[in-house]
């Protein structure tokens, strides 16, 4: 068993390094130590592209040290960045910092190293790069702005409406007149528990959400320059919605905070903030006392158009009259209930969509079909409403036999998905304030003709880098459809945070977040939501798991409304997730930030390995969880365990994860340059734990049982989870892998969507891409293709919709195998942190062809291959500053030749594959007689 190394461990989490060895039956010439072939001195590099600060193109709220990123560009093949130079200036052009020429290939997370930057200030920055031949690029220019600290709100106060309503919709307003000088810049800094909308002269300028504990809430910054006119009245309106605690939502303290800064061409500056002069009123459009949608905290959104307060956010509105009253001032920020605010890096994007079709149910009800499940706020336009008439609008996932939206507990996720709407007279529009996941929207008893253009929905999800979406197409149309469902499901499972489902809980469960993050990073190049979530779970450790035997654990849901609770397997998953992020990004800063916590998790594992007794040497009864989650969840919902022996005191899944935790923490220590003794403190126990697992949990045939009882008896049950985890986490001996893969493949799908990725990973590690393809596309077995065959358009919580349950039909955790498609079936894997090196390993069997684009930290990798009788035809495009290791399956008497313009260096034969190294640019590989296996 070869331990994982940074040099060879692919992004997939595989533990086995590829060892170069000449096959005994093939005589080759290995170009020892030869780098990829590079072009002679040619063109100077082009100006860098895709400039970012803290992973965003033009952030308005940079806190702490800015970190710069870019993509070097060069028309010459085989090129790399050898140096860079960054300058930072004020918006007026005054030089603040010049890095000078820095010899480095680093192009991401490059820290600012100049004097302190002013708060709430705009800066411009430039970067230029040098290539291998010493030629420099033109400079590219970007921009960023700094955020504000808790002491820089300049008197702005938290305000609220005095109420005890459990579902608090409040309007707050004031009216000001900016000075007459030309406005050159205006920024709004806003925070609220829980959701707010900011309006300037009736135009919505911003919307934000903060579901944090006191001291962990967020603020957002909006560029509102175009909405502020010098010398003219400016109505500032805020709507906020506070609705108590729920899953993924602490109660917090109702209220809103705003600072609006207006800067003029003459250098003057005005600040308008929330204070006691503001007027507040209940937003009577929302009916008070609405019932809960389910047991998780959301309430049914009932609207009464007759009670809408019209014109409240426009100039000239009379707010001296009822229902408006003086705002209650909680205090100038910071306050006891809001001692600290964090700049929000993630932002929600909104996209209005229309139905793909309108249906008519048997009773005449109009039902809009949006084609797929979407997380959205529904909208309906009426042209001839009747005051007091209720239209019971309802969203749903499926339809009944009569064509109406299904409302059973099972088919609605146990959620009341209605939006009862009381009309006023005449033309009007229903606009939901809060989103749900749904495909269908029915409009019963509309009282008028409803056309397709009268119905729409605002789809909401986290924004992702522009142009960063992965693509995939293959010879298998079912696989392509599964890919589309998984990528869409991943993106649609991230709103304010990663959520288990956008309908039922809307909670950021650690296991769900890690699974979905795998997919969003791989399919969209997403970074901000993952960074935010990792930091939030680190805060959960600080808040709840900070002493004694609690150390090393994390909340199962965070933030949340039900306090301290964990699931042991989720705590172990966190370590893998941090490592995955590090390999994807090369972000050493966040790895260092997380390291103390994940080291605590390794110690948490070690505390539960007894030295003596029946389970000596194995992780035993890993503390945490309760009820069905005690000592670990294994899989969820319960049917996804497929009979796993939950009575085992030393569970095989937990032990395999424990090996992964120990190895990962040792690797993290090495990556951070920690002392050798520190890495050894985890390397040694990882080896010992691996040996104990193989000695005590492995049958003579190599298959792993589910665990040991407290008295040392092996489980009679040997579920798929046990063996797949042993293989995927590098516990199983290499010699056993072919037989174990055959065993796993013969079982079909016997793991739930929560853990199915590890089954696919195990099969891939055992060189069975055909079995991976089969599981992803077999509609006759449980799995993704079966969901599609049943009409599903979003990954599910479980493979089946069991009567009596409320299993979700919009659960993004089943999208994690996006990465298995990219790494195993397309064949692109990150081989070094931040994708400085990639592995290109098309599958030896299975698909006839595949093509795709994989976003990496250093730019998109494009791969197109097709299978022929003599081998693969491969076309590859590698970003500048990246080296690709290309391993192509060979057949008897055949090899490959490489053709340019980027020329590859031949390395040798490794495990039945011809291996090349190639630098940036386009390269192609074609089958050829074995003696021609070399560059041409």
Image (spheres, rainbow, N blue to C red):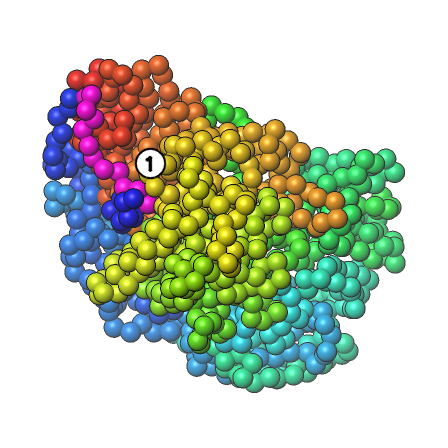
Q: Is residue 18 magenta?
A: yes
Frontmost residue, 590 versus 86: 590
Where residue 24 appears, as percent x and y from the top left, is: 19, 24
501 relative to 829 in the view: left or right: right
Residue 393 image offset from top left, x and y in percent: 78, 50
Residue extent of the magenta highlight: 12-26
Q: Position of residue 485 (x, y in %)?
A: 56, 38
Residue 79 seen in render: yes
- Image height of 272 relative to 672, above or below: below
Q: Secondary structure at mark 1?
A: helix
Q: Residue at x 37, y 36 (%)?
A: 736
**Residue located at (38% from left, 47% from top):** 694
Residue ID at (17%, 48%): 82
Few, some or many residues within 10 Å of mark 1 (<14, 14–19, 20+): few
Q: Quadrant of residue 902?
A: top left
Q: Vertically, is 75 above or below 278?
A: above
Would residue 808 appear left or right of 364 to someone viewing this image?
left
The C terminus is located in which quarter?
top left
Q: Residue at x 36, y 46 (%)?
A: 730
* On-image quarter of the N terminus: top left
Taking 35 as reference, is 466 above or below it? Answer: below
In terms of image quadrants, where is residue 768?
Answer: top left
Counting every numbered tag in the picture gives: 1
Q: Is residue 746 magenta?
A: no
With 542 as the anchor, is 326 left or right in this view? Answer: right
As drawn, is 572 to the left or to the right of 382?
A: left
Q: What secondary structure prevails in the magenta region?
A: loop
- In the image, 646 versus 560, the foreground residue is 646
Pointer 1: what residue?
735
């Amino acid at each position: 068993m070869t331990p994982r190394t940074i040099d060879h461990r692919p992004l997939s989490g595989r533990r086995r390094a590829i060892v170069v060895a000449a096959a005994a039956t093939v005589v080759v010439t290995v170009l020892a130590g030869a780098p990829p072939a590079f072009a002679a001195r040619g063109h100077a590099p082009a100006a860098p592209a895709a400039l970012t600060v803290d992973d965003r193109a033009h952030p308005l709220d940079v806190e702490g040290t800015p970190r710069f990123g870019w993509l070097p560009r060069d028309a010459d093949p085989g090129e790399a960045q050898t140096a860079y130079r960054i300058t930072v200036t004020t918006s007026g052009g005054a030089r603040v910092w010049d890095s000078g020429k820095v010899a480095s290939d680093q192009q991401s997370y490059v820290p600012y190293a100049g004097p302190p930057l002013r708060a709430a200030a705009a800066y411009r920055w430039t970067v230029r790069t040098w290539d291998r031949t010493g030629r420099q690029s033109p400079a590219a220019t970007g921009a960023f702005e700094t955020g504000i600290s808790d002491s820089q709100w300049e008197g702005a106060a938290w305000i609220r409406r005095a109420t005890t309503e459990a579902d608090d919709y409040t309007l707050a307003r004031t009216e000001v007149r900016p000075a007459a000088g030309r406005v050159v810049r205006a920024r709004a800094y806003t925070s609220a528990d829980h959701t707010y909308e900011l309006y300037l002269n009736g135009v919505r300028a911003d919307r934000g959400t903060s579901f944090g504990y006191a001291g962990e809430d967020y603020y957002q910054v909006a560029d509102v320059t175009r909405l502020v006119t010098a010398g003219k009245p400016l109505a500032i309106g805020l709507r906020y919605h506070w609705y108590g605690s729920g899953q993924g939502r602490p109660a917090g303290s109702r209220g809103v905070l705003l600072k609006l800064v207006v800067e003029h061409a003459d250098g003057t500056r005005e600040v308008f903030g929330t204070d006691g002069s503001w007027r507040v009123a209940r937003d009577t459009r929302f009916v008070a006392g609405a019932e809960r949608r389910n047991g998780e905290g959301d309430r049914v959104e009932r609207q009464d158009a007759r009670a809408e307060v019209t014109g409240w956010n426009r100039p000239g509105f009379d707010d001296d009259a009822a229902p408006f009253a003086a705002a209650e001032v909680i205090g100038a920020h910071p306050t006891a209930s809001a001692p600290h605010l964090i700049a929000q890096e993630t932002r929600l994007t909104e996209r209005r969509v229309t139905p793909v079709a309108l249906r008519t149910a048997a009773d005449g009800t109009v039902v809009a079909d949006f084609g797929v499940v979407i997380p959205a706020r529904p909208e309906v336009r009426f042209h001839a409403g009747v005051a007091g008439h209720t239209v019971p609008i309802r969203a749903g996932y499926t339809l009944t036999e009569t064509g109406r939206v299904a409302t059973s507990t099972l088919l609605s996720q146990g959620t009341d998905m209605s939006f009862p709407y009381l009309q006023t007279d005449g033309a009007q529009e229903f606009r939901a304030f809060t989103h749900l996941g749904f495909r269908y929207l029915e409009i019963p008893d509309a009282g008028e003709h409803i056309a397709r253009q009268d119905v729409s929905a605002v789809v909401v999800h986290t924004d992702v880098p522009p142009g960063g979406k992965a693509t995939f197409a293959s010879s298998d149309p079912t696989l392509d459809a599964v890919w589309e469902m998984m990528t869409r499901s991943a993106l649609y499972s991230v709103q304010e945070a990663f959520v288990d489902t956008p309908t039922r809980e809307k909670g950021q469960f650690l296991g769900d977040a890690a699974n979905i993050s795998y997919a969003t990073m791989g399919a969209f190049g997403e970074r901000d939501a993952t960074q935010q979530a990792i930091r939030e779970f680190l805060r959960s450790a600080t808040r709840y798991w900070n002493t004694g035997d609690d150390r090393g654990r994390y909340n199962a849901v965070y933030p949340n409304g039900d306090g301290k609770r964990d699931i042991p397997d989720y705590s172990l998953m966190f370590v893998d997730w941090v490592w995955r992020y590090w390999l994807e990004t090369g972000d050493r800063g966040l790895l260092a930030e997380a390291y103390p916590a994940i080291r605590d998790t390794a110690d948490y594992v070690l505390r539960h390995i007894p030295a003596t007794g029946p389970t000596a040497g194995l992780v035993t009864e890993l503390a945490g969880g309760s009820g069905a989650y005690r000592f670990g969840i294994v899989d969820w919902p319960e049917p996804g365990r497929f009979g796993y022996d939950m009575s085992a005191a030393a569970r095989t899944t937990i032990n395999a994860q424990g090996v992964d935790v120990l190895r990962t923490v040792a690797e993290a220590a090495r990556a951070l340059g920690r002392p050798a003794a520190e890495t050894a403190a985890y390397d040694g126990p990882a080896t010992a734990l691996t040996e104990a697992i193989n000695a005590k949990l492995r049958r003579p045939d190599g298959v792993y049982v589910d665990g040991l009882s407290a008295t040392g008896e092996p489980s009679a049950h040997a579920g798929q989870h046990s063996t797949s985890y042993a293989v995927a986490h590098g516990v199983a001996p290499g010699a056993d892998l072919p037989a174990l893969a055959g065993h796993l493949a013969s079982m079909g799908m016997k793991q739930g969507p929560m853990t199915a990725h590890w089954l696919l990973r195990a099969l891939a590690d055992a060189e069975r891409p055909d079995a991976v393809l089969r599981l992803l596309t077999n509609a006759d077995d449980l799995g993704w293709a079966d969901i599609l065959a049943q009409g599903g358009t979003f990954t599910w919580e479980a493979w089946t919709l069991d009567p009596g349950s409320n299993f979700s039909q919009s659960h993004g955790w089943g999208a994690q195998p996006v990465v298995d498609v990219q790494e195993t079936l397309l064949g692109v894997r990150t081989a070094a942190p931040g994708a400085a090196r990639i592995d290109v390993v098309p599958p030896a069997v299975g698909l006839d062809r595949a093509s795709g684009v994989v976003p990496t930290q250093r730019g998109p990798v494009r791969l197109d291959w097709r299978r022929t009788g003599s081998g693969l035809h491969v076309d590859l495009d590698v970003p500048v500053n990246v080296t690709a290791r290309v391993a192509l399956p060979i057949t008897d008497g055949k090899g490959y030749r490489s053709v340019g313009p980027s020329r590859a260096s031949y390395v040798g034969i490794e495990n039945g594959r011809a291996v090349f190294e190639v630098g940036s640019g386009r390269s192609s590989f074609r089958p050829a007689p074995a003696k021609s296996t070399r560059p041409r």
